[in-house]
Image (cartoon, coloured by chain):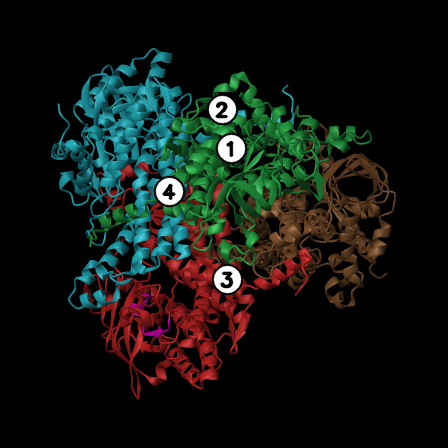
Chain colours: A brown, B green, C cyan, D red
Amino acid sequence: MPLRSGDEYLSSLRDDRRVYILGQRVEDVTAHPVLGVSARHSALEFELAQDPALTDLTTASLDTTGETVSRYYQLPRTPEDLLRRRELIDYGSQVGLSMPLFIKAIGSDCLNALHVVCAAVDDKCGTSYSARVADYRALAAGADLALAGAITDVKGDRSKRPSEQAHPDYYVHIAERRADGIVLAGAKTNITAAPYANEFIVLPTRAMGPGDDNYAVACAVPANAPGITVIARPDSAKNQFDFPLSSRHYHIEGTIIFDQVFVPWERVFLAGEWQFAGALANTFATWHRFTGLAYKGPGADLLLGMAQLIAEYNGVASASHIRAKIVGLIQYAESIRVFSRAAAREAEFHAGLACPNALLANMGKYYFASGYHDAVRAVQEIAGGAVVTAPSSRDYNHPDLHDHIDRLFGGAPGVSAEDRLRVLKLIMDMTASEYAGNWFLATLHGEGSLEAQRLSMYRQYDVQRCVALARQAAGIKDK
Amino acid sequence: MPLRSGDEYLSSLRDDRRVYILGQRVEDVTAHPVLGVSARHSALEFELAQDPALTDLTTASLDTTGETVSRYYQLPRTPEDLLRRRELIDYGSQVGLSMPLFIKAIGSDCLNALHVVCAAVDDKCGTSYSARVADYRALAAGADLALAGAITDVKGDRSKRPSEQAHPDYYVHIAERRADGIVLAGAKTNITAAPYANEFIVLPTRAMGPGDDNYAVACAVPANAPGITVIARPDSAKNQFDFPLSSRHYHIEGTIIFDQVFVPWERVFLAGEWQFAGALANTFATWHRFTGLAYKGPGADLLLGMAQLIAEYNGVASASHIRAKIVGLIQYAESIRVFSRAAAREAEFHAGLACPNALLANMGKYYFASGYHDAVRAVQEIAGGAVVTAPSSRDYNHPDLHDHIDRLFGGAPGVSAEDRLRVLKLIMDMTASEYAGNWFLATLHGEGSLEAQRLSMYRQYDVQRCVALARQAAGIKDK
Amino acid sequence: MPLRSGDEYLSSLRDDRRVYILGQRVEDVTAHPVLGVSARHSALEFELAQDPALTDLTTASLDTTGETVSRYYQLPRTPEDLLRRRELIDYGSQVGLSMPLFIKAIGSDCLNALHVVCAAVDDKCGTSYSARVADYRALAAGADLALAGAITDVKGDRSKRPSEQAHPDYYVHIAERRADGIVLAGAKTNITAAPYANEFIVLPTRAMGPGDDNYAVACAVPANAPGITVIARPDSAKNQFDFPLSSRHYHIEGTIIFDQVFVPWERVFLAGEWQFAGALANTFATWHRFTGLAYKGPGADLLLGMAQLIAEYNGVASASHIRAKIVGLIQYAESIRVFSRAAAREAEFHAGLACPNALLANMGKYYFASGYHDAVRAVQEIAGGAVVTAPSSRDYNHPDLHDHIDRLFGGAPGVSAEDRLRVLKLIMDMTASEYAGNWFLATLHGEGSLEAQRLSMYRQYDVQRCVALARQAAGIKDK
Amino acid sequence: MPLRSGDEYLSSLRDDRRVYILGQRVEDVTAHPVLGVSARHSALEFELAQDPALTDLTTASLDTTGETVSRYYQLPRTPEDLLRRRELIDYGSQVGLSMPLFIKAIGSDCLNALHVVCAAVDDKCGTSYSARVADYRALAAGADLALAGAITDVKGDRSKRPSEQAHPDYYVHIAERRADGIVLAGAKTNITAAPYANEFIVLPTRAMGPGDDNYAVACAVPANAPGITVIARPDSAKNQFDFPLSSRHYHIEGTIIFDQVFVPWERVFLAGEWQFAGALANTFATWHRFTGLAYKGPGADLLLGMAQLIAEYNGVASASHIRAKIVGLIQYAESIRVFSRAAAREAEFHAGLACPNALLANMGKYYFASGYHDAVRAVQEIAGGAVVTAPSSRDYNHPDLHDHIDRLFGGAPGVSAEDRLRVLKLIMDMTASEYAGNWFLATLHGEGSLEAQRLSMYRQYDVQRCVALARQAAGIKDK
């Protein structure tokens, strides 16, 4: 079966799924003024794969089946495979004007993590999850599915483990074990593309302890399975002149409520082995941080480009303090790519898979997440207050105002008011809108919190090697 | 005449002014769904002054007339007067839930700057601007006017002076001098409260040079003067649960187009003395930075409070990394007040006026403006992704979803989903919305750019005193 | 009795004290090539007080006795007293070319802390420590003593309380209680001026718990009391051209070993009341942070001055990136003074004493300590590598080399090689020498660690007031 | 000819060179208490190459001659060659306890830069410098020479070009052109290893303009050539316990005075082609920044190791704020290696040479140089004031004091006073000594100033590609 077209993907979403947004049930997500835009944005992932010129980039062979599939569903075996994967994600993010396409990336991050960790579970516990994961990968790749990764629980009291919570639904759990499968309850939240994915890959969000058995659950669930309700995050439709990005390219996160959802055993990849919940969460995090690093480069370049462009339009591009800020943005953009490629090249091998270097993926993610607000500030400092106060396209098109605005809002010689307004609106949309607000939170928390990354770095670096060097330098003898 | 009530102020805005927003002419700004909210927010300034318990704070004697007027229109004579002024601005910002009331503060910043600089102009040029300024202050104070400060020009090519621009309208200028007054052309932009002020105080926005004579103009103009059009920045109405701040408290900036606007001489405070344009811009900047420092304290406290509240709701308030961020927010909030009070206490005296210490006002403004994005990041790091992904009140109120949300979105024991949603929405509104975007830009640029402040600091500090100390320490003899 | 002269102070140090440095017993500290310099630096404090032109600054009335004493020994009653105290410390630091004179400041910080806390101890425990403290102040002031504050213990395992340590001597403690006094054992370390103070004021360094009774001890001990040994930190003598600061102005810290040292009851100010150990440590910390803020201003100005001077000498003072760094140094220097004065003006009153505002003293100390390395980096960035590679005065004075150096090491037109070498050596001494190393550590740890200051800020700020503001803004009802 | 031994290298330095230190002419640098240590440190480079186990790392084939030579003198042809070169430099830095061995690295950076730029000069100007450079490389490799790179001039007024200076000697220049060669005058300063290199490779330090012809000079000069005088930077001998690093491993920079030094044409690589001076300086800078990145990893690891070790000794290694600082040091250390390897892997090819990626070498250098002071601060914050106040080994060995110190200076259970003193002394030596001061300056300026790197980044990044992305996103049509 060849890869699906964008239209085929969109058609597949008309499946009686139960999605709400702003208190309204949505009959057809592809027709909704908000969700339809994000679904069509996601459809670009499928459209790219139809382009013969991009076949090398967008497809690859799944070595377990020999089929040509989306590169996302390939089993990466070499650093080169990881470099190609990052190139594909990066390219999609360029096509999305800095918004990643994401509709297969996160789901395959989940599958890759399951591949690695289920091998260990099977090894320790005599289970056969690995085979189920392999079968499911073949299925998803063959059907060219749009997958969302359902990881983050609603969590209740963050200082307590799942089984210690006041309410069992604060973490997704196995409400019932049957001969033919399990029944899920609880909810996952912050789930990118939940309203318009074909299936959800459910993974635990954290390490667990004794008593948390029923919370240690991983599985695959179709988006229209009985008992599933998705509440999309609130958003509203925008026009293109005033919101050049958020009118066309965005994702909608959703809260997925699992209300006694049945999952057959062949789709269950962890069911009680709480000792592996942490490993699964962490392995996913590494893969997903690598994805984050790959898509963030074009976003950083876009910030840099808009800053330079408005500086040129305002006639100040050669001022020393402007250049200093541009250099800061260069460092931001290029460092992201440096960490991204390094995490691929210094791959770790687990269960036959080339996995991104965990420490480097982590460090790179931390770098871009902790520096994003500063990068935005640099752009805003360069651009000036007109970013938020400039007239709208409706003002610009009004006969009473058009000529005034045309006369007044030009910049350096030869820069028209229209062009200058366009870049101001672009900066507004990217840095000072609800869309910008989503980016702030997604950048900070999208692949785990900064604190989670600090903990990971502490564990992943060989601190004692450095201590040995210090002991040697100090002349301290080993005991 | 006593101070006006809020209703009297609102009534005064129905004066046939010419205001547009989103391409629509607004007949009555007080009745408009967006502008009406900001006008009523501004009306709070008048309502405070009606409260007998606050009389000491809100009113003062204008010593040139002996009248009891709004404290904003007082001539500050002592550091204590400045401390009281900052207290009033701070209090208004608390009432506005961190949004300053502003409707007299900026205008009186202008009047105070004119008081100081016109004394110098009169002294050097034999003009009598000071008397006009004093008369106008008495008029504004007596009529208890709502004033906007119209300073920032549209500017065209920022690397060129006004007379070097491709178009004369890039800076407001005197298009014609008549026996009875002047005729203004050009536009001012980013003007806070322009759509709902009674009058505009026009000041130059930068230093000027020979040939810029006609751009060196300061004056007072009623908002409904013939030839004036205001284009309000775009914004939309919000509901209170999901947007607890931006549904109730905000200002709308406007671009004021001066299309051959006549201003009689008694309202003209500078007309061609380009050597003083820079001094006027800088003196206003000092006053306005002091205003910025005064209103920003409650905003910083609110950021801190919401961060601590969501940490408590999430059960993580005692985690070490959370506390470290809270301490950062404490430093942010308290440092603002420290600089604010220092700028008052170490007042400079010019033309009989106690003026804020220019260096300290500058440093304080720089501090809060350069640190704002970091403060926001700390709040967002603590709060998590639910800030932008949490269901809306419309979802919460929907019968299909209400119980699910109630069950799933609670936090630490005893924290209801409703309360937790409310604080998430508050954080969303304050840090991740269009309103937040406005705050980013207003904080960076509202009282001049960071670069402008760096230049000011370099000029205002006695660097050569330090060089002398270094020479002494190095044993270098004076030449 | 009038205040002592510098010579009288120096004479008083020939008292058979037991001081070691670099493994040598020192017979007469005033004659030692290293300790003599620091003793003479300290003697400047006494010389200042002999200058009739400075009497207003250096002396004050001790209101309990009516005597005119060193201003350090005054009981501050008003914010103005604190401002004058800071001015005296600041002035001394200028005289010391950025090195504070310190020889009465720290001791009186101890006395002020004892005044406040002993009032509370007496109140709760029925003791009469306050009277002893008052008597001792009168004695110290009357005899114009040089006092060191002996606070920091050697500490052993920092994660354990005193009574939990492997060795009782890790904290100074009461080894024996006698009818006429107590016997001390243990050691205090990092004690500024220990080798050349007349007496030590011993205070606890941390909060204590049950079982730590014998470690909760405060008292005054003469430097030559039997059983006391001081080990001075290592240092070596320098020449003035190459080390313009560290050849003349520094302090030597010492470790004070208490080997069964008897202290009569009238000199004992705490002896077992462990509940107050933390309050005493914290109250001292506030006073001492205020001292730190007062002396650091001239140091910051000196950094700024040397940076500007070498920039002028190198012909680059007007480069934009140089100016940006100078502005950073301006902010550093002036912010220190802003916090310093604010801590005085917003004094807190305890036991009749005007005490520095604890939060502000803390914030200011944190500010200067956390920013010091950055300030040094700015200076070094401006100055260039010649700071450490430039020829020494011995090279410069060698007949083979003098003319070469004179020809080669000049700078901008009119700048001689000698002057340029002098400022390079000054920067080397201040930022890149052992002396500089001492400053790094003293700045970070001299008035408590940054972490201690973070904890203090968290406790001293009214976080719940901010939470209430957030609750109000979010529309959350009080329970 | 095989590679030289350490002793052969040391013997070769007894060649009547003219070296001064602290105003004393040094007869035999290998026997001098200061210079001898640095010469023996450099000899380690030769000793490593004698170790058969390291042959693969330390040697390589010079493809132009087929000889096996020091890897430093290899012509790198592939990214893998660059990775091996960085590995060798890194390894040497480990052997030197974080101090690079350097005695061939910098010289070969010069040769590699000459290889690239002379090809361009020959191409444009018809010269035959490339052949001379190749011959010289064969000579240097064959004789296994110790080379220093002599780049930085004394510079005079930094705002002026060489020919605009008040004195011609502010930049090294051709004082005379003869049939058989050129005569050099002027001086180079900050030259690492100048007192104990066999030869100096002279390169221009900056871009030049018309009129600077005689300053555009590159050549190779033996260290004992007539007319050469080296003034070593001042330093003094140390003992190992108290200065575990600076007693054994350091380099001494020198100022090299060229007093009419004759250089035959076959050793002249640029002589008047001022248009290439900038390219030569920049190409060298890229190579040398790559060297800097390679040697800095072990230094960063050592900082991290000593911080962790003292934290363990003090019993605080598990405190959250300590871990946060350790994580910061992890990021510092690992990021350096990430940039280092990336600069090798993304090599640029010029004149047949695999050259480090200029942008990435630059970014990495900027990263480690701008972050070094912060890294030191983190170590010092963790370690506490005892770093500078702890007793010296002479105290520790004194019979009166030894037992006291042994009893008092232990740490966590099982940590002896001696071991704790050793790590405190290590931290003192690395962060708070003259040696530390040298590192601060060397790190900031050793491979060019931070400002130079900012300029390079601005030039090396494709800003206009980002602008095109912004234009596309904003919907701005190409003109």
In this picture, residue C358 sits left or right of residue C89: right
Q: Do discs 4 and 2 share a chain? A: yes
What whole-number distance in Å separates the C-alpha atoms at marks 3 and 2?
58 Å
Of badges 1 and 2, the one in the foreground is 2
Q: Chain of mark 3?
A: D
Q: Between residue A338 and residue A278, name the one nearer to us.
A: A338
Mark 2, Cα crowd under 10 Å, few <14 / some 14-19 / many 20+, is: many
User: How many angstroms separate mark 4 from mark 2 (CA)?
Assistant: 30 Å
Query: Residue C75: x, y in percent?
Result: 27, 21
Q: CA distance from mark 3 to mark 4?
A: 54 Å
Query: Of label 4 and label 2, which has the lower sequence position?
Result: 2
Pointers 3 and 4 within a single chain: no
Determine whether, in the image, residue D162 is placed left or right of residue A120. Answer: left
Residue D406 visible to the viewer: yes
Q: Name the chain under label 1.
A: B
| Residue, disc 2 | B69
The residue under label 4 is B126
- Secondary structure, mark 1, is helix
Q: Are marks 4 and 2 in contact (CB under 8 Å)?
A: no
Residue B48: x and y in percent read 56, 23
In which quadrant will I find the C terminus of chain C?
Answer: top right
Q: Position of residue D158 (x, y in %)?
A: 34, 63
Residue bearing the label numbered 1: B105
Q: Give the labeled residue for mark 3.
A: D457
Specify the segment rendered in magenta. Answer: D190-204
Q: Quadrant of residue C3?
A: top left
Mark in front: 4 vs 1: 4
